[in-house]
Image (cartoon, rainbow, N blue to C red):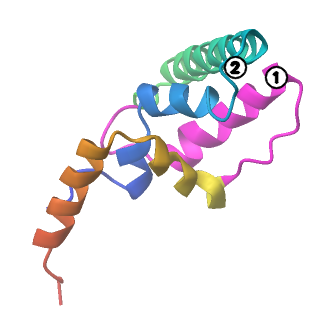
Amino acid sequence: MWKKRELENYVCTEEVLLSYARRDLPGDLFGQAEAARREMAMRDSIREVTQALKTLGKKDPWSSDMKVTDDFLDPLFQKYFEKLGFDNLFLKNDYYVLASFVPIEKLNLILNVSRQAKPLD
């Protein structure tokens, strides 16, 4: 029933990652400037890590069967926080936070699929 390799594959989309980058900022001019800086850092990081994967002959990060946590999200967030000048404290055990940036209709689809799942026993 599940079509993706791991749960993180369902929350690993460009839309979610860009929403994460723009999070928790005020709507004033300074907040908008910081949001734009963070979004650009995320876009650049996505492009660089995606290109590195392609160069190494690995799967596309949006592929359903990629081990997205190890092969994409880990290096992505390392690169992203490096571009922002911060240590990367957003690690694998924090990736559940990305689910809060998934549009609700997509979360409902995942919930519906999970309700249909049957144990393999």
* N-terminal label among 2 and 1: 2
Quadrant location of the C terminus in the rendered image: bottom left
**Image side of residue 34 versus residue 100, left or right:** right
Q: How many marks?
A: 2
- Element under label 1? helix
* Depth order, front residue of 71/7: 7
Q: Amino acid at mark 1?
A: Leu
Compared to residue 18, the image places residue 9 above or below, namely below
Q: Residue at x 74, y 35 (%)?
A: 78
Q: Residue at x 46, y 33 (%)?
A: 16
- Residue 3: percent from left, percent from top: 21, 52
Q: Are marks 2 and 1 in contact (CB under 8 Å)?
A: yes
Residue 88 on the magenta segment = yes
Badge 1: residue crowd in 10 Å (few <14, some 14–19, many ≥20): few
* Depth order, front residue of 36/116: 36
Compared to residue 98, the image places residue 7 above or below, namely below
Compared to residue 62, the image places residue 93 above or below, namely below
What residue is disc 1 on?
Answer: 84
Q: Amino acid at mark 2?
A: Arg
Q: Quadrant of residue 22?
A: top right
- Residue 10: percent from left, percent from top: 35, 47
Numbered badge on residue 6: none
The residues colored magenta run 62-91
Q: Residue at x 80, y 48 (%)?
A: 89
